[in-house]
Amino acid sequence: MEFKISKEFITEIETLISEKNEQAILQLLEDIHFADIAELMNELKEADAGYLFKLLDSEVSSEILLELDEEVREKILSELSAKEIAEELDEMDTDDAVDIISELSEEMKDEVISELEDFEHAKDIVELLRYDEDTAGGLMAKEYIQVNENWNVLTCIQEIRKQAENVSRVHSIYVVDDEDRLKGRLSLKDLITSSTTTKVMDIYIPKVDSVKVDTEDTEVARIMQKYDLEAIPVVDETNRLVGRITIDDIVDVIKEEADRDYQMAAGISQDVEADDSIWELTRARLPWLLLALIGSFVAVNVSQSFSDAMEKYKILFFFTPLIAAMAGNVGVQSSAIIVQGLANNTLTGSLFKRLAKEMLLSLFNSTILAVILLFGTHFLMETSYEMSFTIGTALVMVMVIASLIGTFIPILLNKYGIDPAIATGPFITTSNDIFGIFIYFTIAKLFLGF
């Protein structure tokens, strides 16, 4: 059952910290999961969080360190010596240790690495630091189980026992040749049911999904999601096994990508959080707001060019927000579906077929809405049939064009290597406002003859 960090619990901890009652604090936290303790520390004052962190055993505090908010973790790390940080890293898997050490200054990195007690652990961390954090190499851990294809089952079991000491969870047993090239994977069932003299090469499964060290993290996530994998091996350019990526790391990637796309769609150009400074939030939001302002200014000029029509048919003015809103909504809907398909790699068929399908869909939806609008304007607002028909026809045309723009733009951006997520935000809304108003008044001009 999930433990809820209540205000009363936080107050109790703060009281015990002020009293320096270490025994009572440890007793209170004894059965609480490290993720819940991290949540508690995120709510405490910086000094109290630092005190609590140093109070805990390194086996627990190392787990907590990974779960803390970045600002809290940064503050705690700044108050630890190189030796103290090294003690935390010694308890972590290499991929987690690299995540922590990457947040340190270059000088502190060198000091911490020199303080690591386990030489092999330190060597693995240094190796992983070479890779870009957004690649499979930057995600992978060096803790995995590998066996040689030439071993017999008895030797294999003995070696697995040795290797398993450094592996928190065995997802797969990977089979390599004498050059450490990945050959396949070994089923635990086949291992324990085979004779001790049976060779690994006679029972291993040659088919195994893997990724290269320079594969982008989002592509790794897509592969693991597609094939429902708990872990995937990582190989270098010569197919040598160099690491593995587990599902918990991929969940983080998927969450970060979703957060980034959501912010991009909302017109926020940088990765920010609610607690960031006003300056950081302004830098993230202002560029898109400027774009929206320019776009809206263009839309105003488009409307102004039809001022004569609005003087003659004042009712046209009142429907301008409706037309612009429908254009923006349809464009965002269309682009959101395309962006999702591109992200999940589920978008199939030619561009022409995609546009044709979207046009038919929007034509069907817009016709239904136009009929409702036609009767609404005529019977509720008592406009003429001619005016109602004009507005309804404009609505159909605007929605069809908006859906085509919303479909085409993300595909075009993706083709040229630009993140299509930007198409689902102010970019599509603003552009469709302009086109929508222009099309609306152009159709009104053709039908009403002004």
Image (cartoon, rainbow, N blue to C red):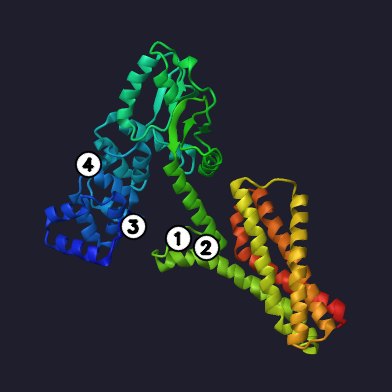
Comparing labels 3 and 4, the label whose residue is closer to the camera: 3
Evaluate whether residue 307 shows in this view: no
Q: CA distance from mark 2 to mark 4?
A: 40 Å
Q: Amino acid at mark 4?
A: Lys
Q: Position of residue 421 (x, y in %)?
A: 59, 56
- Image spot of residue 149 (x, y percent): 45, 16
* Residue occupying image coordinates x 49% and y 14%: 202
Q: Earlier in the sequence, mark 4 or mark 1?
A: 4
Q: Are marks 2 and 1 in contact (CB under 8 Å)?
A: yes
Q: Which residue is mark 1?
A: 272
Give the SS element for disc 4: helix
Secondary structure beneath label 2: loop
What residue is disc 2 on?
268
Q: 10 Å neighbourhood of mark 3: few (<14), some, or many (≥20)?
A: few
Q: Secondary structure at mark 3?
A: helix
Q: Residues within 10 Å of mark 1 (few under 14, many from 20)?
A: some
In three-dimensional space, the C-alpha distance between marks 3 and 4, rounded to whole angstroms, equals 21 Å
Residue under pointer 3? 71
Left or right for 342, reference 112: right
Sequence-wise first label, 1 or 3: 3
* Secondary structure beneath label 1: loop
Q: Residue furthest right?
A: 449
- Of the residues shown, which amino acid type is indicated by label 2? Ile
Tag on residue 10? none
Q: CA distance from mark 1 to mark 3?
A: 12 Å
428 lies left or right of 304: left
Question: Can residue 34 be seen from the camera position used here?
Answer: yes
From this view, report whether residue 401 is shown above or below residue 32: below
The residue at which mark 4 appears reads as 83
Q: Residue furthest top?
A: 197
